[in-house]
Amino acid sequence: MSLKRRCLTALALLLPGSALGERLTVPGTSVSVDVPAGFVPMPKSVIDSKYSRGGLPPTAVYSTPGPHWEVNIAFALRNTALPAGDLAPVQAGLERSITATPGFRWVKRGIVKSGGRDWIDLEFWVDGIDTPIYNHLRVTREGQKTLLVTGNVTKALYPKYGAVIDAAMNGLK
């Protein structure tokens, strides 16, 4: 982690209203996360609506409260096992699948160890419907399933929530 990112993460922990809140276990997994203070569970009806552009919606989402639900940390547990061994081939496939997204720009990518497990760690910007969106995606094995965790925030809210999202993602255990 760069010095700038470490400083931003440390600053996020000190700012009122942006500190990490309660540590929760991701539903259906052995993984836990510090959900940022002020984030609330997104209702299923909102998940189904917000994540309706194809594919399966996440199984759980924590977000800044509605009505806009603008900053999210979403969890998806998929019934697909990642291959044993090195995650680099899976990382390469994920990278190929997302780089064609309009407005795509890398921030960082790699494989990190957190909570005793390897995670594919991808940070990038894409063009949303009406604004650029920052995404921090982590992917790991969870038994015979795949756990995807993604934090995202709009460009306008990134100065306030970017480091908060990254701190939560970096604290996955």
Image (spheres, rainbow, N blue to C red):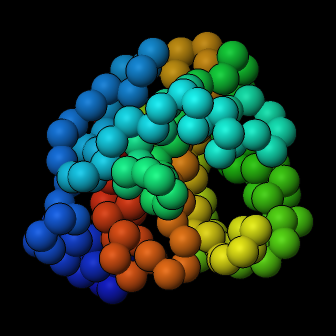
Q: Nearer the viewer, residue 139 or 101?
A: 101
Residue plotted at (41% across, 42% down): 62
Up/down of 170 relative to 50, above or below: below
Residue plotted at (69% across, 16% down): 79
In this rendering, position of residue 73 left or right of residue 106: left
Residue plotted at (83% across, 39% down): 54
Residue 151, position in %: x, y? 49, 54
Q: Nearer the viewer, residue 132 or 142?
A: 132
Q: Nearer the viewer, residue 38 or 13?
A: 38
In this rendering, position of residue 143 left or right of residue 35: right
Viewport quadrant of the N terminus:
bottom left
Residue sitting farthest toward the front: 67
Is residue 108 in view? no
Up/down of 75 relative to 159, above or below: above
Viewport quadrant of the C terminus:
top left
Residue 144, position in %: x, y? 61, 14
Residue sitting farthest toward the bottom: 4
In this rendering, position of residue 99 left or right of residue 86: right
Residue 100, position in %: x, y? 88, 66
Residue 22, position in %: x, y? 18, 40
Residue sitting farthest toward the right: 100
Is residue 5 in view? yes
Total marks placed: 0
Residue plotted at (58% across, 62% down): 135
